[in-house]
Image (spheres, helix red, strand yellow):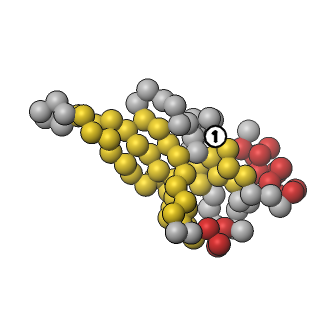
């Protein structure tokens, strides 16, 4: 599926952000501007793309209990950061 989407992006020279494939992906250098948030609805975690101050990164949030049983939300960058202007 990713190859078909990347072909579409290349052919149209059109950046694309999509999701719900459960496969988060942030393009590498010299690749078409295709980004996939993965899945924002999942029992254990959610992934997404953050764009802040011209910087794009793929992130993951999940629930994490501590030894006392308190549950907190943790965040991790799983790809990036990349300057938005360098992607197009």
Q: Nearer the viewer, residue 22 or 55?
A: 55
Rendered position, 32 above or below 1:
below
Residue name at image x 53 percent, y 37 percent: 40
SS at circle 1: loop
| Residue farthest to the top, as pictured | 43
Q: Is residue 13 left or right of residue 82?
A: right
Residue name at image x 16 percent, y 30 percent: 69
Q: Nearer the viewer, residue 7 or 16?
A: 16
Residue name at image x 87 percent, y 56 percent: 11
Rendered position, 12 above or below 46:
below
Which image quarter holds the C terminus?
bottom right
Q: Quadrant of residue 70?
A: top left
Q: What percent of the width, then of the height, locates residue 24?
A: 56, 44
Q: What percent of the width, then of the height, locates residue 25?
A: 59, 49
Q: Is residue 55 left or right of residue 4?
A: left
Which image quarter holds the N terminus?
top right
Counting every numbered tag in the picture gives 1
Crowdedness near tag 1: few (<14), some (14–19) or many (≥20) residues, C-alpha within 10 Å: some
For label 1, the residue is: 19
């Amino acid at each position: 599926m990713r190859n078909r989407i990347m072909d579409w992006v290349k052919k149209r020279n059109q950046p694309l952000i999509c999701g719900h494939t459960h496969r988060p992906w942030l393009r590498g250098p010299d690749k078409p501007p295709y980004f996939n948030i993965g899945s924002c609805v999942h029992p254990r975690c959610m992934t997404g793309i953050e764009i802040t101050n011209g910087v794009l990164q793929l992130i993951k949030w999940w629930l994490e209990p501590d030894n006392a049983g308190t549950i907190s939300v943790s965040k991790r960058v799983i790809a990036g950061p990349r300057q938005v202007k360098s992607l197009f």
